[in-house]
Amino acid sequence: MHGEIRFFLLKIYPVHDIMDGIFMQFRRSLLNGEENVMIKTGPETATRKETPSTATDGRQWHKMKYNFDTCPDRRGTGCYKYDFREEFNAPEDALPLWVADMDFTSAPVIVDALKQAAEHGVYGYHGARDDYYQAVMNWYEGHFGWKSEKDWIVTTPGVVFAINLCIHAFTAPQDGVLIQQPVYYPFARSVKTNGRRLVNNPLICDGGRYRIDFADFEKKIRDEKVRLFVLCSPHNPVGRIWTEEELRRMEEICLANDVIVVSDEIHSDFVWEGHTHHILAGLDPKYQKNVITCTAPSKTFNIAGLQCSNIFIPDPDLRAAFKTALDATGYGDLNLFALAACRAAYTGGGEWLEQAKQYIWDNICMAVCFTEQNIPGVRMLRPEGTYLLWADLRELGLGARERQDLVLHRAKVWLDRGEMFGPEGAGFERINDACPRPMLEQALQQLAAAVSSLGL
Ligand SMILES: Cc1ncc(COP(=O)(O)O)c(C=O)c1O
């Protein structure tokens, strides 16, 4: 079956002809951290068009138990990614690679748990029990070596909800809340809509890799009455996995200045080879005093629509204040489907996740490689984590409107504009690569053709 799909793709998407030969070489370079990769595209690679049965020398995509190449048609389901074109002024035929969910069917173990819950037919009040908390804690201990306690966990219907709650619970109007733009846009919105002062410590893009301006970070914290720092770790959209040293440095500054850290670690299950995600609160017991760790199974298992997140608050005073703010919203418990899905995901979803990650990693390699080879003026930054690509189009020299016209209307690819993530995002586009590879390839080809039509 897999072979048939691949053969079909070879015929429809000739991009494979050039991709196969350069892919492994590129991937090796990526793993070795080489900055300027020379990719050979000589005739012997370009003409090696292999049928599935002969492509046995490793120069092929990872073999998959699950079929991520074909996904259910999401149109008409009410999902944002496909069904809100009118609201977002996106052309009918634009390929949607924007909102950060996956097109893949979730893990079978989750689908089964949901079916079982649905078929039961009685949908009364439900709550999280020991087995739920145990599943969550086991996941974080098993994957990150982080030992937590059941009492630390507070469930909320989303991480953005929890961030808003933290702003409410731990800051007063006009207090400074620090973020690092370009960053996931609800961070800035949460600060502003709650009437707090937005303090930005812009990340610096250095040769295609972002870094933190620590001097600015410390100065802003000291000078701008910052009470709360919302950290994005791994970072959406720039794809950084913060090193232990970077995390410790930020945290030490925060501790020294009585700043509470909300560490949004929702993307922590997508970490690419050569990098390690560190749970900030797990680096040192003293960090438990001021760090709130926001987690969720939603990105990892594509269950965002079920609205489930687990917020770890080890410090009893912070937890009490958070719970008071939570009670004031009138929010009760996670719904029974969220509970069932989260428990199933964290107990039996591991194998599916490994497969999904391999597929996404191949997508990433393909996209970075294709862009380097075929889209002059566009640079696809190499992500260290997340399933999001951050494309740098600044060399094209287009204004925001012209770039929007190029991407959305000429290329017919629907992305998240860089400006949404803050002024530092100008000239960039965010691409969600958790989609079938043929769709991603199609989008890249359309982008390449549109850029080429500019005649620059
Ligand atoms: C960094 C980050 N935090 C939070 C969220 C959304 O979390 P939730 O749906 O649980 O509010 C996203 C979704 O893209 C995200 O990228």
Image (spheres, grey):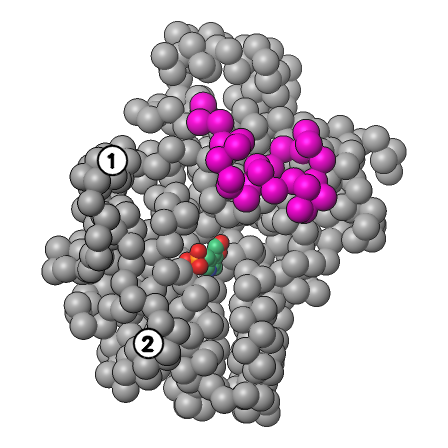
User: Does dot 1 land on a helix, a strand or a loop?
Assistant: helix
Disc 1 packing (10 Å; few <14; some 14–19; many ≥20): few
Task: State the residue in front, 121 or 300.
Answer: 121
Q: Which residues are magenta?
A: 69-96
Q: Disc number at residue 35?
A: none
- Residue beneath the point at 17% across and 68% down: 150
Above or below: residue 194 compared with residue 385:
below
Three-letter code for the amino acid on which mark 1 is drawn? Lys
Quadrant of the image occupied by residue 46: top right
Helix, strand or loop at mark 2: helix
| Number of marks drawn | 2
Query: In the picture shown, does residue 39 fall above or below 31?
Result: above
In terms of sequence position, does the residue under pointer 2 or pointer 1 come before the other?
A: 1
| 135 displayed left or right of 413 | left
Residue 25 picture location, percent across and down: 51, 31
Name the residue beneath numbered marker 2: 327
For disc 1, the marked residue is 115
Q: Of 431 and 37, which appears nearest the observer?
A: 431
Residue 440 placed where, x, y %? 57, 31
Please report the residue visible at 42 percent of the width from the left and 74 percent of the height from the top: 165
Place residue 311 in its image quadrant: bottom left
> Is 380 situated above or below 45?
below
Q: Position of residue 123 (x, y in %)?
A: 23, 48
